[in-house]
Amino acid sequence: MNLRDPENLFSAGSSNPSLSHVPFVYSDAYLITLEGLEKLHPFDTQKYKRIVEALLHEKWISDKDIYSPEPVSEEDLLRVHTPYYLDTLKDPLKVATYLEFPAIASVSPEKVYRNVVLPHLWVTGGTLLASQLALDHPLVIHIGGGYHHAKPDRGEGFCLFADIAIAIRALQDKGKVQRFLVLDLDVHQGNGTAEIFAEDERVFTFSMHEKDIYPVPKAISDCDVELASGTDDAEYLRLLSHYLPEITKLADPEMVFFVAGCDVLADDPLASLAITEKGLIERDAQVVQWFLNQHIPLVFLLAGGYSPNAWQAQYQSICHILEMVSNFQG
């Protein structure tokens, strides 16, 4: 899908040989299955798998491009979460509350942990792996992740673990990277991420989100841009292009986490913006273009998206990004 001439997407001096390989992080262990109960939740638990299968089928990627993570360790979880909170994940009622998934409250603790909590541990491990791969690659795409509502002492908003914060703390603690930008373009504010890093000047949090929806009240990011219901492609992309240089200068990041939620789409049932699929693809291209030109590694996370065409829209966006990179390399 060519939205514009790929020759103009990158500055002449930005070529990087490692762009010839874009790592993808994914595992089938991400799948949540509960004998059909998972279909009662707004999130399509098959979304990630559908995207990967389509990318493989259409030969955009091959098996060698996919890196499979391990579940995140307790040591890494404790960089952000409290021991008490982690212990509550053995209680189906607590998990049901965090995920806003009442149907699982009466399911056995063993089954909820194995079929619901464990997949979240795998996805969180995926974000951690993606951040490690970004030490050597300008762009890493995680087919998952972006649990930006989770907080140290509780989950909320469909999120159990603060995967971005865990990855950032691991890199900071190991002395790998210190300064980060979290660029959150999910339609819902990344309140958990904002709260976790409120006192850390090394992590700049930016959230551009719809104003009058969850979470209420909002947290305070380093920079919040609130959008009115009905915001369309033109205004959305104008704001993004205005803020990208500004926040990059303020953050001076060594690595960027891009929360690329597709719940900005016009038909998303949990929001009310007016972004088209073309607008979403243009948004993601704009972000990738900007940070590749700045020579700042980018971790791309799929995050939220609840409309019937959510997976197709993100699939098309990823294809466009790969096409951009391929044409640039050529």
Image: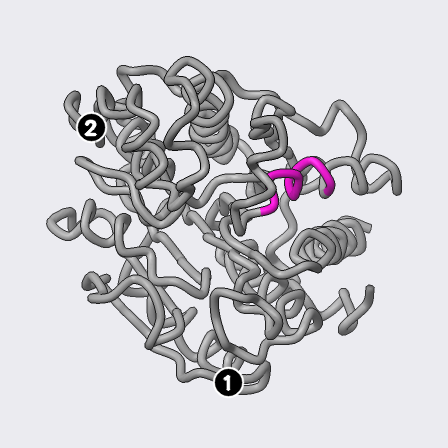
Q: Residue at x 17, y 21 (%)?
A: 83
Marks 2 and 1, how far apart at CA: 37 Å
Q: Residue at x 47, y 27 (%)?
A: 116
Residues 61 and 32: in front is 32
- For disc 1, the marked residue is 230
Q: Which element carries disc 2, helix, strand or loop? A: helix
Residues 318 and 276: in front is 276
| Residue 183 against residue 92 in the figure, above or below | below
- For disc 2, the marked residue is 85
| Residue 240 against residue 174 in the figure, above or below | below
Residues 302 and 243: in front is 302
- Mark 2 and mark 1 lie on one chain; the one further toward the N terminus is 2
Q: Which residue lies furthest to the front in this view?
A: 106
Q: Which amino acid does label 1 sit on?
A: Gly
Q: Magenta span covers which residues?
A: 44-50
Magenta residue check for 130: no
| Residue 258 against residue 71 in the figure, above or below | below
Q: Where is residue 171 in the image (x, y as percent from the top left)?
A: 32, 29
